[in-house]
Image (tube, coloured by chain):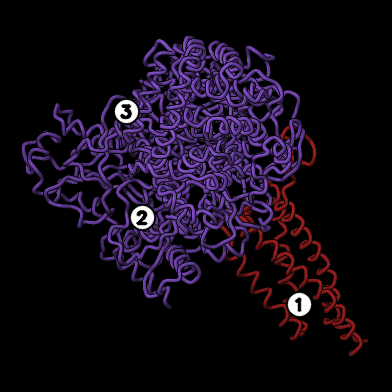
Chain colours: A red, B purple
């Protein structure tokens, strides 16, 4: 029986990728919420109330920032895992994203806490659009990766 | 003639009312008109007038605002509201006569307006029946009511209502006292006798009008005659000569309207028009101006109406067209739209006679049609009434004159005066060969281009001082915008000081139910009960309360409400608009008292200033004030009432700051005034011997936040060095050797996010932090500024401040403080910017926190704060011809009132690239680019930002060259509207914020960037491109009169040393600094008469004041400088710079057209651009 480290890492990656997909969806929803302004529908009274109830960029950033590092670490963890399992192809596929993550975190705005998103600039349309695009690209990548891991796991199991 | 005219009149009358519904604002109610006029006129037009205005308008003050205040406009609004009061349910609308100055004058009017309106209405009714049109026209000349007359004869209820409203407004412009007497007297007596003469007048007036319209300023003799005639009639009618003049002015306006509408009536009207146009003729400059504004609006509306008149009235329409046309070219050319400029007095008698029947109809279309097009529903309704009106006329021609004036060219030949307008290429598109044009800078200040709307809308539109768009013709699609390579955005000055502002109290503030837009002059009324939102196109109901018009005390005229007559209004908001009871005014002063601060000596100045202005701090009886000082510890002051003297409480635990006695640190200003005064007297001497050099700014701010968070308010922080203790401590990041580096400029961004986070916390608690940085060394403004940037505060920087060594800075601080302490303030504010569906906000610039895509959170709003917004076009605007922008600023006034100030701007949409270029507001574009460049330098790098600026010029000019102009490509061609673009961008590149290669301290650079972000456009432009005047030969030629002072208006000089002659003396106005450069061989007479020294050699090196000498040249120079100073909130300091003195490098740095060792000259820059384009 060849239940070696490689299939194990694929299984773990499968599970963790599900987590990453969840994070990414969370991102996408949060940015979408920021972008689409909930103009209160037909309700002829105070403008203030809806405004105050609306989630502010501060809230959104406070919820998003804590999950940025975990996502990056999980992804880095994959890379280490596949490195150890000597799955070079998979590792090669993962490396670009790892590099992107490193670059992204290096170039984050000046912040004392962990995270990427600055509530004072997040509403800037360019940045918001970038974040949204990043979110959807990542979602696509993770989804493909999910199926790739599934395939890879079965392939490794079968071939061994 | 007469008969047809009469007919024409009737239909017109009818039409106008209908027209009113949709957009009622312009036309009828004098009240709204006045107010609008005041606003717009002054804003758009008056400004130019000030400069331009000749002696006639002596009374006018420099600013548009002044105009407001003076006369008519302010009263109008007030008056109107008061009138409504009397008549109507008291609650519906009021004017607020708050304690503050501007409104109070209105009070007087209250009783009077109602009276007048009643009188006038009566009179008007009587007239029409008796006199018929002629009589009416005559009446109009003599008396105010004339405007409404046309409607009356028609017998429409609307007309009557209109009438009343109009009367009231017209009356108001005139002096209050005279009003009652006049109105009655004038209206009745005058009309009857004069009719025949009036007719005569009319004819003359027609000719006069046309001339007037064209020449605006250059009053031909005919005008004078007309005026005299009028006055004569008036005199007969009314006893007061002065009043008569004013009346006549106002009357004519109204009259003008009639003539415009109906050609037959014309004669009377025309004179009025002429009078309006030519305020100078009138004895009283101020009043005429006001009246003028009204008339113009009236005219516009009428003009719209006039479209219906195809009749023989041709002369009238011509004149009318001429009027409009006259304004058009001016507007486009960006020269002052106001009458003042009166560049070409060309009397053009031709236009008046020339008019043939067909012309008028065509002409009329553009104007008249703008509205109908907008509101199809309305059109239909009106159409039946004006059978004569050409409904078939293609809608919007008004908006796009160039493209759509097919007939114009043909007509133009006959209409000499119209040639400018009708020329296929508007002035703003005239190709300018930049490299050939040596004097690109105009001699007169550059005014904002006026959107190419029909006259109605134009008059209603928001003042460019408050609201400007970089493109006054909005491209239809993003693709078109991309092709034009021009930035699209808005520049706002929402809370600027206005001397006149309609304030509306109403139970229901009418807003669109889906997009929450406030009702504004650009909505369309589908019928009496429904209106269509101009931003989202939803059809809304008109609430019952809105049907009643308080101004006219009439029912069923929602289109005449002040909300619909003014594009800048202020609402008193109900409790619906409050999340909590309105906060009191709360001021906290946080003062650095370390050794460095004491050494600089700012405390003396501050305390002195505070003592002087303690009673002028804006606020009500709840006003609270508190003080904190800090060095390495934090000191609180217990000022609780009942103490015998202030108690100082020291907290030395700066790691965990707490408030020793939270309740007694912020105290009521009035209850504890004695203690406060004691403290202020003691403070400057309390720390004289301190040896503490550390500064715990961060903890002090945390304490301030704790102290303020229950209420919110304003924190003023005075800091003199780098914070060195506790949270938020900073390290010096500047490398002095890199100051003149041409490569990378680092550290433009903050070193820590401590200040930003604290600012966001403050913003959440409605607390704004204003930073005064008085420091001689590097203090890392880039980090410190965050505390103000994100809490909507403001930043003041006084480099190398010292109260004795640097007296000019000390004086500046003193003056700035006076303004700072006493200016208006709004608390717990939010500002929302809405725009027509299809456009969206992209990025905001200024000091605030963005809460959502269109909502800015402003803990405080100050009248000196400006904002910029980048826009993008998300959906094509093909199905609309107009777009509107609305900013609503909801704030708590210092009196504890919740108020909403609403500005609405309306702009046309164009589909051709040429039109986009024709509508560029180059100043706005440059200011927006500057804002974007600041962002770019912080997020990317300074060199990126500089490249982007250059590319902006290269791209737009090459796009223009390849698409619009078909001239040879070897030359650098720009449309006239963009001819200053390269110059301004070069000026930006040489501005402290963006320059490289010249030694610039990091803090100076960062401060310049902060200013770019938060200064309103007018002040920013001076900072970017200073104005240079030669002042040793001031003459009264072209001088304007302000407050009985003669203010000379020397021509602008280009910023080049070639203009500096050794024999001259030059004044450079850089916004916050004035330099007077004295040439070496300057005339000794000038030096003696103005500077008070016998010769050049005896002028001291440091001179910051002009002595008050009793000579003509001294008087002129001083009145000019004072006038320049009065126009801005922060008093600039004056430096007299001798040629050869070391200080002259400062001065020469601003000569941006010259070459420096590190930067291009203007000509080289042009060549560089040309090279880039050819690549």
Residue at image coords 60%, 32%: B25
Q: Is residue B107 visible?
A: yes
Give the answer, above or below, for where B9 lies relative to A17.
above
Gap in angstroms between the C-alphas marked 1 and 2: 54 Å
Gap in angstroms between the C-alphas marked 3 and 2: 36 Å
Instruction: Determine the secondary structure under disc 1.
Output: helix
Residue that badge 1 annotates: A81
Residue that badge 2 annotates: B991
Q: Mark number for residue B58? A: 3
Give the answer, above or below, for where B719 lies relative to B172.
below
In the image: residue A84, left or right of residue B763: right
Quarter of image, res B537: top right
In this orientation, which residue lies closer to the viewer: B655 or B1117? B1117
Chain name for mark 1: A
- Expressed as whole percent of the image width and height from the top left, the position of residue B355 reads 48, 44
Instruction: Determine the secondary structure under disc 2.
Output: loop
């Amino acid at each position: 029986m060849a239940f070696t480290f490689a299939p194990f890492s694929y299984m773990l990656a499968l599970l963790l990728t599900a987590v990453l997909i969840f994070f990414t969806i969370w991102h996408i929803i949060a940015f979408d919420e920021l972008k689409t302004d909930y103009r209160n529908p037909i309700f002829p009274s105070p403008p203030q109330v809806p405004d105050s109830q609306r989630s502010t960029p501060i809230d959104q950033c406070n919820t998003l920032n804590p999950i940025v590092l975990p996502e990056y670490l999980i992804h880095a963890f994959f890379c280490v895992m596949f490195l150890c399992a000597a799955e070079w192809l998979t590792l090669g596929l993962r490396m670009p994203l790892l590099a992107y993550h490193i670059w992204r975190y290096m170039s984050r705005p000046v912040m004392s806490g962990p995270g990427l998103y600055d509530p004072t600039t997040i509403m800037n349309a360019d940045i918001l659009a970038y974040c949204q695009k990043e979110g959807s690209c990542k979602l696509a990548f993770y989804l493909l990766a999910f199926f790739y891991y599934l395939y890879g796991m079965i392939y490794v199991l079968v071939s061994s | 003639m007469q008969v047809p005219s009469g007919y024409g009149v009737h239909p017109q009358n009818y039409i106008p009312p209908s027209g009113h519904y949709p957009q009622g604002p312009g036309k009828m109610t004098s009240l709204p008109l006045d107010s609008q006029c005041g606003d717009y006129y002054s804003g758009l037009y008056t400004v130019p007038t000030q400069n331009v205005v000749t002696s006639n308008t002596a009374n006018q003050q420099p600013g548009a605002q002044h105009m407001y205040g003076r006369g008519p406009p302010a009263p109008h609004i007030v008056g109107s509201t008061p009138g409504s009061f009397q008549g109507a349910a008291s609650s519906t609308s009021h004017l607020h006569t708050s304690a503050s100055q501007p409104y109070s004058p209105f009070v007087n009017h209250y009783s009077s307006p109602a009276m007048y309106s009643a009188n006038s209405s009566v009179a008007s009714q009587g007239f029409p029946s008796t006199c018929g049109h002629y009589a009416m026209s005559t009446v109009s000349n003599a008396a105010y009511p004339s405007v409404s007359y046309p409607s009356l004869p028609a017998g429409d209820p609307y007309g009557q209502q209109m009438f009343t409203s109009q009367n009231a407004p017209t009356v108001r412009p005139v002096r209050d006292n005279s009003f009652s007497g006049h109105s009655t007297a004038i209206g009745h007596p005058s009309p009857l006798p004069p009719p025949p003469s009036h007719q005569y007048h009319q004819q003359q007036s027609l000719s006069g009008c046309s001339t007037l319209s064209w020449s605006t300023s250059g009053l031909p003799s005919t005008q004078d005659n007309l005026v005299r005639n009028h006055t004569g009639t008036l005199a007969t009618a009314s006893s007061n000569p002065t009043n008569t003049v004013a009346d006549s002015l106002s009357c004519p306006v109204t009259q003008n309207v009639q003539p415009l509408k109906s050609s037959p009536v014309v004669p009377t009207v025309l004179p009025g028009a002429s009078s309006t146009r030519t305020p100078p003729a009138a004895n009283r400059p101020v009043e005429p101006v006001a009246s003028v504004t009204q008339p113009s609006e009236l005219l516009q509306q009428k003009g719209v109406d006039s479209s219906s008149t195809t009749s023989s009235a041709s002369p009238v329409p011509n004149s009318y067209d001429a009027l409009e046309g006259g304004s058009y070219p001016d507007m486009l050319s960006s020269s002052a739209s106001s009458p003042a400029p009166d560049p070409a007095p060309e009397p053009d008698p031709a236009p008046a006679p020339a008019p043939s029947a067909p012309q008028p109809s065509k002409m009329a279309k553009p104007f008249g049609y703008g509205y109908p097009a907008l509101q199809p529903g309305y059109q239909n309704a009106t159409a039946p009434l004006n059978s004569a009106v050409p409904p078939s006329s293609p809608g919007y021609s008004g908006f796009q004159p160039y493209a759509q004036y097919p007939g114009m060219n043909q007509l133009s030949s006959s209409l000499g005066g119209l040639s400018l307008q009708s020329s296929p290429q508007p002035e703003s598109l005239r190709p300018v060969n930049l490299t050939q044009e040596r004097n690109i800078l105009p001699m007169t200040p550059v005014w904002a281009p006026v959107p190419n709307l029909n006259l109605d809308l134009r008059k209603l539109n928001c003042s460019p001082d408050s609201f400007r768009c970089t493109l006054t013709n909005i491209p239809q699609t993003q693709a078109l915008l991309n092709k034009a390579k021009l930035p699209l955005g808005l520049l706002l000055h929402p809370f600027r000081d206005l001397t006149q502002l309609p304030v509306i109290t109403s139970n229901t503030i009418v807003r669109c139910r889906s997009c929450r837009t406030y009702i504004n002059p650009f909505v369309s009324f589908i019928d009496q009960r429904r209106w269509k939102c101009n931003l989202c196109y939803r059809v809304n109901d008109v609430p019952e309360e809105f049907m009643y018009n308080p101004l006219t005390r009439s029912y069923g005229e929602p289109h005449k409400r002040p909300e619909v007559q003014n594009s800048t209004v202020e609402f008193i908001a109900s409790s619906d608009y409050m999340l909590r009871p309105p906060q009191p005014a709360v001021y906290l002063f946080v003062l650095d008292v370390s050794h460095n601060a004491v050494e600089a000596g700012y405390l003396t100045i501050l305390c002195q200033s505070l003592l002087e202005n303690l009673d002028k701090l804006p606020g009500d009886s709840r006003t609270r004030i508190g003080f904190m000082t800090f060095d390495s510890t934090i000191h609180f002051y217990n000022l609780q009432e009942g103490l015998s003297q202030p108690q100082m409480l020291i907290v030395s635990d700066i790691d965990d700051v707490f408030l020793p006695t939270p309740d007694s640190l912020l105290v009521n200003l009035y209850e504890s005034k004695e203690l406060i005064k004691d403290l202020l007297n003691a403070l400057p001497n309390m720390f004289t011997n301190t040896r503490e050099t550390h500064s715990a700014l961060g903890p002090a701010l945390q304490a301030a936040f704790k102290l303020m968070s229950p209420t919110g308010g304003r924190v003023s922080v005075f800091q003199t060095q780098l914070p060195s203790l506790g949270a938020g401590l900073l390290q010096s990041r500047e490398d002095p050797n890199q100051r003149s580096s041409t490569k990378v400029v680092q550290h433009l961004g903050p070193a820590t996010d401590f200040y930003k986070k604290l600012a966001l916390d403050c913003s959440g608690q409605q607390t704004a932090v204003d930073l005064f940085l008085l420091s001689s060394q590097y203090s890392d403004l880039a980090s410190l500024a965050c505390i103000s940037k994100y809490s909507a505060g403001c930043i003041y920087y006084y480099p190398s401040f010292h109260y004795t060594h640097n007296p000019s800075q000390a004086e500046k601080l003193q003056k700035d403080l006076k303004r700072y302490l006493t200016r208006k303030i709004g608390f717990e504010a939010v500002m929302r910017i809405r725009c027509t569906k299809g456009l969206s906000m992209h990025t905001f610039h200024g000091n605030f926190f963005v809460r959502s895509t269109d909502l800015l959170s402003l803990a405080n709003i100050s009248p000196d704060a400006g904002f910029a917004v980048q826009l993008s076009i998300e959906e094509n605007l093909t199905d609309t011809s107009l777009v509107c922008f609305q900013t609503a600023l909801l704030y708590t006034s210092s009196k504890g009132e919740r108020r909403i100030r609403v500005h609405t701007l309306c702009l046309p949409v164009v589909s051709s690239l040429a039109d986009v270029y024709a509508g560029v507001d180059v100043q706005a574009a440059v200011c927006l680019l500057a804002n974007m460049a600041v962002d770019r330098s912080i997020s990317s790098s300074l060199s990126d930002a500089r490249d982007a600026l250059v590319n902006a010029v290269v791209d737009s000019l090459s796009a223009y060259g390849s698409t619009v102009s078909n001239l040879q490509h070897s030359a650098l061609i720009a449309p006239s509207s963009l001819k200053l673009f390269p110059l301004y961008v070069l000026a930006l590149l040489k501005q402290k914020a963006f320059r490289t290669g010249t030694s610039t301290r990091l803090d100076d650079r960062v401060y310049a960037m902060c200013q770019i972000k938060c200064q309103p456009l007018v002040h920013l432009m001076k900072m970017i491109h200073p104005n240079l005047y030669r002042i040793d030969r001031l003459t009264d030629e072209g001088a304007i009169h302000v407050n009985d002072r003669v203010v000379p208006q020397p021509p602008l000089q280009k910023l080049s040393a070639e203009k500096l002659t050794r024999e001259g003396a030059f004044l450079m106005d850089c916004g916050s600094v004035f330099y007077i450069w004295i040439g070496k061989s300057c005339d000794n007479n000038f030096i003696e008469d103005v500077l008070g020294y016998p010769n050049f050699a005896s002028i001291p090196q440091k001179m910051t004041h002009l002595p008050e000498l009793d000579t003509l040249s001294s008087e002129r120079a001083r009145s000019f400088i004072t006038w320049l100073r009065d126009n801005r909130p922060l008093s600039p300091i004056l430096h007299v710079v001798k040629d050869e003195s070391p200080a002259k490098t400062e001065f020469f740095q601003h000569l941006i057209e010259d070459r420096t060792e590190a930067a291009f000259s203007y000509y080289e820059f042009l060549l560089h651009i040309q090279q880039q384009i050819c690549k």
